[in-house]
């Protein structure tokens, strides 16, 4: 780092002595310092807490600190009028910070604390901390000493055991806008959804309209299962032991659903029972929150009673569906009626009752994490495809295009991500439910992307095989080549994992799902955008819609006119241009 020359004068030593509680030995060491490197070594050897910062324009930075320094000067004048006996109160310890800055390589420092009483005599900043001290060491270097008072709650709280049971607060209106984050327990639960989504997607390939219907039917239930759990835990989970027990039982139901998912279309009994277990847990959880709401007379009791009633009715409807093992229409009708009823109840009460507002939750973070889960499934399928398609140059290029596409869709969503939208009652619900079609389209696109690359890779292998067969036909005397060609043909026809896939359906799914993701991200961006920034946001969203129109138009192409590599290249180019437009906002 830069070696800036400095000179520690008696005046500087006097200014540093009390705030840093310098000993006589440290004062002697400080006086012989000649440059910034020596000063940094001094802070390090004396075990002071420090931070290194470089400011390109030192005068501008110092002007920012000037108001606080003026307060310091005023405070010094007041201290001179106080009794000398107060100087004896500087022996206790507290933690300040000192910073040294320069316009080249200078380094600000965080140092050890002066006495608590000394801090009390200094003026306070607006944030409740002590006003900083600024000391010039040279034309380019200065020290900034900052003081921080400890949080009394942190001092008094200390280590504590996890409570066995705590009644959740039914009224969330006073917590709207407070910063919260997902708990480790919630993240642990989401891991199971990663495995379930990946396993079901791998076993139920979307190769035609029928398979798409089966997958969508399953995804609706699983998505709402996750969403209903997240709606509760992001608002009322207080991390006590009882909530951990709730989660264990809930995950048992989820694993039961996962085990029966492979046959849920024909034999749904295990799937239904697993869902009922999870719904029973939510019913108990909301009932526990309802009890203190009724006792205290909270206005949240109406909404909570609605939640309890909705989950009880949903539990009943799913139980009735057990009576229709062979009647798929009645069974799915009962399932979707229960889900629709729960959605309506949540929408109504969150719109009319601030006591259950999403603004007091970290649901935005949970949805972002679930989006990562869905994109992670895309990545898992993509990596599996990469491993199976080999290292041929053209296939490697196709794989790289696929990686770029996944990343650009990730960038598009998280570049617009904003948790603040949950504080808006109407927009929060629109934002939340737009994620269902987004997640479904992301899953469908991930499958289509992997299949497109696989078809492209296998197409090259098939062309090579045809060449071998043609050569064998022309040279009939070469029986060995002919036998090899026949063997390879038989193996390819028997073991090809894509022999049952319709390429035209895959290509249409690729373009349609990609276009729908663009449109849904455009809608989510509009929901996130404030009125003041709507002009630039409208340009970004219009560009996304235009790209989606291009994707939809490309569904009319066939593999003969546009192969897999060209498709991937066009989509990557369009999304790359879109990313550049997104950066304008």
Image (cartoon, rainbow, N blue to C red):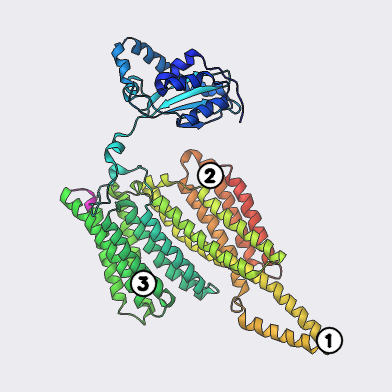
Range shown magenta: 297-301
Where is the N terminus found, in terms of image quarters? top right
Of residue 546 and residue 429, the one placed in the foreground of this image is 429
Where is the C terminus found, in terms of image quarters? top right
Q: Are marks 3 and 2 in contact (CB under 8 Å)?
A: no
Q: Are marks 2 and 1 in contact (CB under 8 Å)?
A: no
Question: What residue sits right under mark 1 in the picture?
Answer: 475
For marks 3 and 1, give the CA distance. Answer: 60 Å
The image quadrant that residue 433 belongs to is bottom left
Q: Is residue 451 above or below residue 145?
A: below
Verify whether residue 298 appears in magenta.
yes
Q: Which mark is residue 537?
A: 2
Residue 146: horizontal and vertical position, in percent?
Answer: 43, 26
The image quadrant that residue 493 belongs to is bottom right
Residue 155: horizontal and vertical position, in percent?
Answer: 29, 36
Number of labels in the image equals 3
Residue 572: horizontal and vertical position, in percent?
Answer: 64, 56
Question: What residue sits right under mark 3 in the picture?
Answer: 256
Q: Is residue 129 above or below residue 201?
A: above
Q: Nearer the viewer, mark 2 or mark 1?
A: 1
Q: Nearer the viewer, mark 3 or mark 2?
A: 3
Of residue 57 and residue 52, the one placed in the foreground of this image is 52
């Amino acid at each position: 780092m830069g070696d800036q020359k400095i000179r520690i004068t008696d005046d500087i030593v006097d200014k540093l002595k009390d705030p840093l509680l310098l000993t006589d030995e440290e004062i002697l060491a400080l006086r012989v310092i000649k440059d910034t490197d020596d000063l940094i070594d001094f802070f390090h050897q004396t075990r002071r807490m420090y931070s290194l910062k470089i400011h390109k324009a030192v005068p501008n930075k110092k002007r920012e600190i000037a108001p606080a320094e003026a307060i310091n000067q005023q405070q010094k004048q007041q201290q001179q009028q106080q009794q000398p006996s107060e100087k004896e109160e500087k022996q206790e310890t507290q933690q300040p910070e000192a910073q040294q800055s320069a316009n080249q390589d200078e380094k600000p420092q965080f140092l050890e604390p002066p006495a608590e009483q000394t801090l009390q005599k200094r003026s306070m900043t607006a944030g409740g901390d002590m006003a900083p001290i600024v000391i010039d060491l040279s034309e380019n270097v200065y020290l900034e000493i900052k003081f921080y008072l400890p949080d009394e709650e942190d001092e008094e709280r200390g280590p504590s055991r996890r409570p066995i049971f705590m009644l959740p607060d039914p009224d969330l209106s006073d917590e709207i806008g407070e910063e919260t984050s997902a708990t480790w327990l919630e993240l642990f639960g989401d891991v199971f959804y990663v495995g379930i989504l990946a396993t079901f997607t791998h076993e139920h390939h979307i190769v035609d309209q029928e398979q798409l219907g089966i997958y969508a039917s399953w995804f609706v239930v699983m998505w709402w299962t996750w969403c209903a759990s997240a709606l509760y835990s992001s608002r009322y989970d207080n991390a006590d032991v009882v909530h951990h027990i709730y989660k264990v039982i809930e995950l048992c139901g989820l694993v039961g659903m996962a085990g029966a998912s492979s046959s849920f279309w024909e034999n749904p009994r295990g799937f239904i029972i697993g869902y009922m277990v999870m719904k029973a847990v939510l019913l108990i959880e909301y009932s526990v929150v309802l009890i203190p709401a009724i006792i205290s007379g909270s206005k949240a009791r109406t909404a909570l009673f609605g939640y309890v009633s909705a989950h009880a009715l949903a539990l009943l409807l799913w139980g009735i569906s057990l009576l229709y093992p062979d009647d798929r229409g009645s069974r799915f009708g009962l399932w979707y009626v229960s889900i629709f009823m729960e959605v309506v109840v949540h929408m109504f009460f969150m719109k009319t009752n601030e006591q259950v507002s999403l603004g007091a939750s970290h649901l935005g973070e949970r949805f972002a994490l679930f989006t990562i889960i869905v994109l992670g499934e895309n990545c898992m399928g993509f990596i599996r495809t990469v491993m199976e398609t080999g290292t041929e140059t053209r296939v490697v290029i196709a794989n790289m295009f696929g990686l770029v596409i996944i990343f650009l869709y990730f960038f598009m969503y998280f570049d617009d991500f904003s948790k603040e939208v949950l504080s808006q009652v109407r927009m929060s619900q629109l934002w939340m439910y737009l994620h269902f079609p987004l997640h479904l389209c992301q899953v469908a696109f991930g499958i289509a992307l992997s299949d497109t690359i696989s078809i492209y890779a296998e197409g090259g292998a098939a062309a090579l095989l045809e060449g071998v067969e043609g050569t064998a036909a022309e040279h009939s005397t070469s029986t060995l080549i002919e036998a090899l060609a026949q063997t390879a043909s038989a193996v390819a026809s028997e073991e090809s994992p894509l022999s049952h896939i319709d390429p035209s359906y895959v290509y249409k799914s690729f373009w349609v799902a990609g276009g729908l993701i663009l449109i849904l991200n455009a809608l989510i961006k509009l929901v996130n955008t404030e009125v003041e920034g709507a002009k630039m946001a409208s340009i970004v969203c219009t560009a996304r819609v235009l790209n989606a129109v291009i994707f939809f138009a490309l569904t009319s192409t066939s593999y003969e006119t546009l192969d897999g590599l060209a498709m991937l290249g066009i989509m990557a180019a369009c999304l790359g241009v879109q990313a550049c437009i997104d950066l304008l906002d």
